[in-house]
Image (spheres, helix red, strand yellow):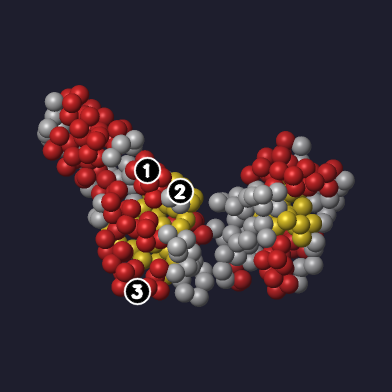
Amino acid sequence: MSDSLLYVVSTPIGNLGDMTPRAVEVLRRVDVIAAEDTRHSRRLMNHFGIDTPLIPCHDFNERQQAQSIIQRMRQGESVALISDAGTPLISDPGFFLVRSVREAGFAVVPVPGSCAFVAALSVSGLPTDRFFFEGFLPAKGAARRKRLESLATFPATWGVYESPHRIMDLMADLIAVIGPERYIAVAREITKTFETVLVGSVSEVLAMMQADSNQQRGEFVVLIEGYKEVATDVIEPQVSKMLVRLMAELPIKKAAAVVADLTGVRKKELYELGMKIRSGH
């Protein structure tokens, strides 16, 4: 290619039929492909008959590689960025490279395609007018639960990626933090042979997964319904808002106790309201 451009190219997340003709054309015509894992991506390149040179660009070398890529572009080369699967930068490396290339004065061009989060969202049955992508939650239990507590009162659909090693821990944490009744969708192995999408309340989906160990295997997108405001004739709206705000930082019991001390409303009533808010009812 004559122009020095950085192409951000999406690749399939499972089904090779999702590779777009434009993606194949771009990957064949650029001077070099920056890949998250060159060994993994070489198999994809071989499948589509793409012999463009691959260079590694991952979490551990991205800053150094960015300078090398910019130097190539200054010499007139075009570069494509790919991740192991799906759209680069979406819980994958590439942010620093894209920002650096733009700051160096070069254009960055998207070549869109597969994205596990968007694919799962489209079939989840959850509202899509507003949504939030959290990416991967912290691996350690206490940190994960704390982050879930801050997301529990988010008023729109939100979702995370999860591995097979932690999926059941995440489900248990969802029961504890947002309650058993909130509607969720657990999408497994999207576009792959054993793709499944389980939907229902947290407790219903957990029961399905416990009943079939196969539903605990693979790569997961977990989507959660946003919480709904709880109408109450007993507690003033400003008190409810105070409770919601504190619940983003504290466990329900502690938040209810603090609001009770400040307002004089009974702690039991505040706790019950907090549980309703967390469950989305």
Whether 85 is drawn above or below 140: the answer is: below
In percent of width and height, residue 76 lies at: 86, 47
Q: At numbered mark 1, what does the secondary structure look like: helix, strand or loop?
A: helix
| Residues marked 2 and 1 touching at CB (< 8 Å) | yes
Which mark is drawn over residue 212? 3
Which mark is drawn over residue 47? none
Category of crowding for the residue at label 1, using alpha-carbon neighbours closer than 10 angstroms: few (below 14), some (14–19), many (at least 20): some
Image quarter for residue 207?
bottom left
- Residue 131 visible in the picture: no
Give the residue at x 83% y 44%.
Answer: 71
Give the residue at x 29% y 33%.
Answer: 246
| Residues marked 3 and 2 touching at CB (< 8 Å) | no
Q: Nearer the viewer, mark 3 or mark 1?
A: 1
Category of crowding for the residue at label 3, using alpha-carbon neighbours closer than 10 angstroms: few (below 14), some (14–19), many (at least 20): few
Q: Amino acid at mark 1?
A: Lys
Give the residue at x 62% y 53%.
Answer: 88
Which quarter of the rendering shows the N terminus? bottom right
Q: Nearer the viewer, residue 102 or 264?
A: 264
Q: Which residue is mark 1?
A: 146
Q: Amino acid at mark 3?
A: Asp
* Number of numbered discs overlaid on the protein picture: 3
- Residue 262 visible in the picture: yes
Mark positioned earlier in the residue sequence (2 or 1): 2
On the rendered structure, is 249 left or right of 261?
right
Which mark is drawn over residue 138? 2
* Disc 2 from disc 1: Cα separation: 9 Å
Category of crowding for the residue at label 2, using alpha-carbon neighbours closer than 10 angstroms: few (below 14), some (14–19), many (at least 20): few
On the rendered structure, is 239 left or right of 250?
left
Q: Amino acid at mark 2?
A: Pro
